[in-house]
Image (spheres, helix red, strand yellow):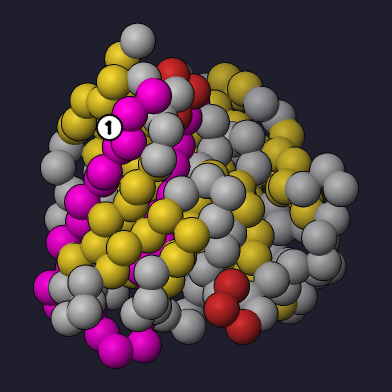
Amino acid sequence: DAKTTQPPSMDCAEGRAANLPCNHSTISGNEYVYWYRQIHSQGPQYIIHGLKNNETNEMASLIITEDRKSSTLILPHATLRDTAVYYCILGGSNYKLTFGKGTLLTVNP
Amino acid sequence: NAGVTQTPKFQVLKTGQSMTLQCAQDMNHEYMSWYRQDPGMGLRLIHYSVGAGITDQGEVPNGYNVSRSTTEDFPLRLLSAAPSQTSVYFCASSSGAGRGYNEQFFGPGTRLTVL
């Protein structure tokens, strides 16, 4: 599986938008970009995924660059409960997910 | 739906003991998998199954066995526990349908300590 690069940590003020970047310069044409998060000691939680187009759901928005070499997860109004490790993962059709170390997002009051 | 359930939540073993970590899902998902997570690390895939009767190895399979006799259950067996297997174990499932190949649902985890 292709790899992703994320900053180890980020801070965000409560109520502001949190923008989490991810680089995936070797992404294959059929690979989706998935975002999961893991709140302390809990199982990972799916957030969103996309292939080419930008995606939005009730949790977040996903912006994928036109060349697909990078993406940004946007939490529009971060709350203290959004403090978690966020994982950017590339996934094809083989069901396997390869987790890196992710980005620890700390939302501050 | 209960989603993905795991038992036990906590377990302490002595070196050489065997045990089975249980995982069950009630979403009729074909795909199930086991991951381990060591402190400060991401999750690593141990074994996975794409359907009843079909299993395969992941990134770190040594010391673990699995079987998939039903769609609902995917137990993970430690044959002879070692301190290196001290970790948090997560089970996950996915329907694998359409764009949701990797939209996986994770259980709450089993925290295992091997002394």
Choose top left, top right, bottom left or bottom right for residue B22: top right
Q: Chain of mark 1?
A: A
| Residue located beneath label 1 in the image | A104
Q: Quadrant of the C terminus of chain B?
A: top left
> Left of A59 or right of it: where is A27?
left
On the image, the x and y values in percent for residue B104 come to: 58, 59
> Left of B68 or right of it: where is A22?
left
User: Is residue A46 at all visible to an observer of this figure?
Assistant: no
Q: Is residue A84 above or below residue A103?
A: above
- Mark 1 residue type: Leu
Q: Which residues are magenta?
A: A15-41
Residue sitting at x 31%, y 15%: A108
Residue sitting at x 26%, y 43%: A19
The kind of secondary structure element at disc 1 is strand
Q: Is residue B73 above or below residue A11?
A: below
Residue sitting at x 33%, y 29%: A16
User: Looking at this rendering, what residue extends furthest in the bottom direction?
Assistant: A29
Q: Is residue A59 above or below residue A104?
A: below
Q: Is residue A22 magenta?
A: yes
Nearer to us in this view, B55 or A87? A87
